[in-house]
Amino acid sequence: MTRILLIPGLICDRHVWQGCLAALAGHDVAVADLGVATDITAMAEQLLATHAGDLIVVGHSMGGRVAMEMARIAPTRLRGLVLLNTGMAPLKAGELPKREAMIAFAHEQGMAALADHWLPGMMAAGIPPDPEVMAGLRAMVCRMTPNQHERHIRALIARPDASLWIGAWQGPLLLMTGRQDIWSPIAQHEEIAALCPQARLEIIEEAGHFAPVEQPAAVGALISAWVRETATHAQEEFQ
């Protein structure tokens, strides 16, 4: 059975995917641990080594960048690629000092303060955040350490430019983002879709950057249906 590998993003863990797991019941599903790798390529190589066989890789935010790198390194092992709330571009002009400032903030103020500073901007713009959703995300961030946060930020600073090769990916591709995601907006996903004509782009309503947490039922249902459809098409081609 092809494994569905769910990859969380920056200072995230299994919590990001918890609400989606019920919709994926009956599949071989694993949630990735990004471990102590210090760059996107090393994270991708670690996951390919840890999870044997064919994979459908589902990446959220930074996890989407890891997923794209896995597809570059081992395209014949991936049976599908799902990218949520992410982008393909390298470091942008003016981004570095903002990233460095966040690293310093976490070391100086701690992870609870970082959660309170960072998370509100990740929620659906213009929609009051659900207190329960915010509480769960805050607890997740507080499980991390400033050193883990710095390691992930450093990986993002040095991230590969996936736009140079993502067009070579010819396998099934599902793109998803929140309608109100101002961090990884719809336009970024449209740019990926423009390079990959086989891509399907789904917009999650009333969701920001944490669409799998803000709207887990909708995200889980879309992934499950797409996986079933992808498997059916693969069987038809084989026959």
Image (cartoon, helix red, strand yellow):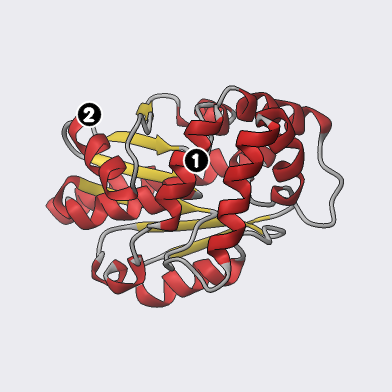
Expressed as whole percent of the image width and height from the top left, the position of residue 29 reads: 37, 28
Q: Quadrant of residue 115?
A: top right
Which quarter shows the N terminus? Answer: top left
Viewer-proximal residue, 126 or 81? 126
Mark 1 surroundings within 10 Å by alpha-carbon count, few (fewer than 14), some (14 through 19), many (20 or more): many
The reply to whether residue 39 is visible in this rendering is yes
Res. 68 mark:
none
- Relative to 13, residue 80 above or below: below
Res. 150 mark:
1
Q: Residue at the location (18% across, 53% down)? A: 73
Expressed as whole percent of the image width and height from the top left, the position of residue 97 reads: 58, 61
Secondary structure state at the residue bearing disc 1: helix
Expressed as whole percent of the image width and height from the top left, the position of residue 182 reads: 68, 61
- Relative to 183, residue 197 above or below: below
Alpha carbon separation for disc pair 2 and 1:
24 Å
Viewer-proximal residue, 148 or 172? 148
Secondary structure state at the residue bearing disc 2: helix
Residue type beneath disc 2: Thr
Q: Is residue 55 left or right of residue 148?
A: left
Find disc 2 in the rendering and name its residue.
Answer: 50
Q: Residue at the location (69% across, 40% down)? A: 214
Mark 2 surroundings within 10 Å by alpha-carbon count, few (fewer than 14), some (14 through 19), many (20 or more): few
Expressed as whole percent of the image width and height from the top left, the position of residue 144 reads: 55, 26
